Every structure is written in structure tokens, then in C-alpha cells.
Amino acid sequence: MRASLAVSAALLAAAPAVGATAPQVSWGKLGVSFDQYRADAVACGRAGYYRDVSDTDAARVFRNASHQFDTITDSGAAPVSMWETTMLDASAGASHNSRVEQAPVLAVERSQRVGQLVASTQPEKRMAEVRVFLEEAVTSCLTERGYTRFRLTKEQRAKLSHLRLGSPERHAYLFSLATNPEVLAKQVAPLTTA
């Protein structure tokens, strides 16, 4: 468990930070009530949130990386303790090629192997794959409920960027777009992933 958390942290640290930007697309449906619109948004959001990703290629890559991380960190000599350092330095017969001198080399080698593991795992690519997989569940759910995806204009995105995420004002604004016949007719976005 410790190693899995450590490799996950290393992989996420390698991924670039994603800034909070206004969405490029949204979903709408003519004639839907505000309450139904919100209920559908929550239900379909949950469909994506709770979708099982354990059998995806990305999950397999991360599991494999976690096992490799365990192998890297569990192999070789254990870190040198302060007691060993004192004892080896104090002994008259300690060679210059002692564990104390080898410890920094082992640490560098391990660090290099972990870096190579993170690079080969391509965490940014894998997380994008998971995002697409989760978005597919949301898209399927909304489509089944009769919603149409539409592309937000630059002006609409600018207005959204000034409305706090989750605020009633933001919900009301998105609802006004989602039920606007002109928006749904002119701003239709094709259903592609990525």
C-alpha cells in the first residue's frame, strides 16, 4: 500500500498542473425543467464518477508501474543507519568500499530507475485516457436522456469563467443556454472523444 501511494504520488507529481478553464462544450435539451436539468446533470455526473476504471489499459499500466516501483525500492541494500555509520567509521578494519560509501550510489541509481519508470508510464497520457473513459459514461447517459451537446462561444466561456463553480448563478446561466433553441440549433458540437 505504501509503495502504491508513493508511485501514485510520483506519477501525479510528474503530470503538469491543469488550470481551471471554462468548459468548451455543454449539454442542452429543449423543454426540460430546471429541476430535471439539475437532476440529470447529477445522475450523469455520477455515472462517470463511479465508472469502474480498473480494467482499462491505463489502470494496467499504473498497476504494473506500482509493482516495478516496489521492486526498485525493495531491492538492493537497505538505507544505512546512523548506528552503522558510526560502527563502520570506528572500526579499524573498515574498508573504503563500505556500505556507507555505497549508499549514495544506490540512492542515485534508485532515483534514476524511478525517474525512468515515471517517464515510461506517461502519466499525462494515461490520465487523459481515464478522463476520456469517464467522459464516455457521462456522454452516453446524457445522450440517452435526450440531451444535445453544444459548443460554447468565446463570450459564453468568458461569462462562465466569472461565475463560481457550483454557484446558483452558474447553474442558472448554463440552464439558460441549455434550453435556448437558438443555441441548440447553431452551436451543436459533434460527439467525439478527446
Image (cartoon, rainbow, N blue to C red):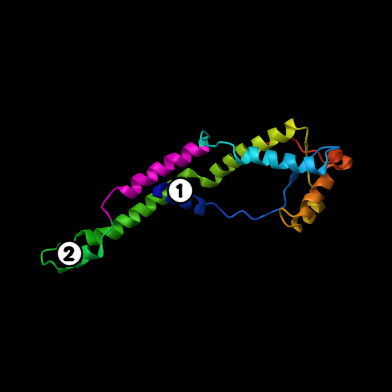
Given the current orientation, which residue lies at the most extreme right position?
Answer: 182
Amino acid at the residue labelled 1: Val
> Is residue 186 shown left or right of residue 45?
right
Question: Residue 26's mark?
Answer: none
Residue 30 vs residue 98, the one in the foreground: 30
Percent across and percent down for residue 77 are: 26, 52
Counting from the top left corner in percent of width and height, residue 36 is at 78, 40
- Quadrant holding the C terminus: top right
- Left of 39 or right of it: where is 9? left
Q: Residue furthest top?
A: 144
How many numbered dots are placed on residues in this image? 2
In the rendered structure, the answer to whether residue 5 lies left or right of residue 39 reads left
Identify the element where label 2 is drawn.
helix
Q: In the current view of this chain or complex, which residue is farthest to the front?
A: 35
- Badge 2: few (under 14), some or many (20 or more) residues near its Cα, within 10 Å? some
- Work out whether residue 119 or residue 12 is closer to the camera in this orientation and state it: 12
**Relative depth, front residue between 118 and 146:** 146
Q: Nearer the viewer, mark 2 or mark 1?
A: 2
Q: Which mark is residue 88?
A: 2
How far from the left and from the top, in percent, is residue 58? 52, 38
| Disc 1 target residue | 118
- At 42% from the left and 48% from the top, the residue drawn is 116
**x, y percentage for residue 7?**
44, 49
Q: Could you tell me which residue is drawn at 53 percent across and 34 percent down?
A: 56
Disc 2 marks a residue whose amino acid type is Leu
Q: Inspect the magenta stretch and tell me whether residue 76 lies in it.
A: yes
Relative to 166, is 190 above or below? above
**Principal secondary structure, stretch drawn in magenta:** helix
Which residue range is magenta in the image? 58-78
Going from N to C along the chain, the mark reached first, 2 or 1, is 2
The span from disc 2 to disc 1 (Cα, nearest Å) is: 35 Å
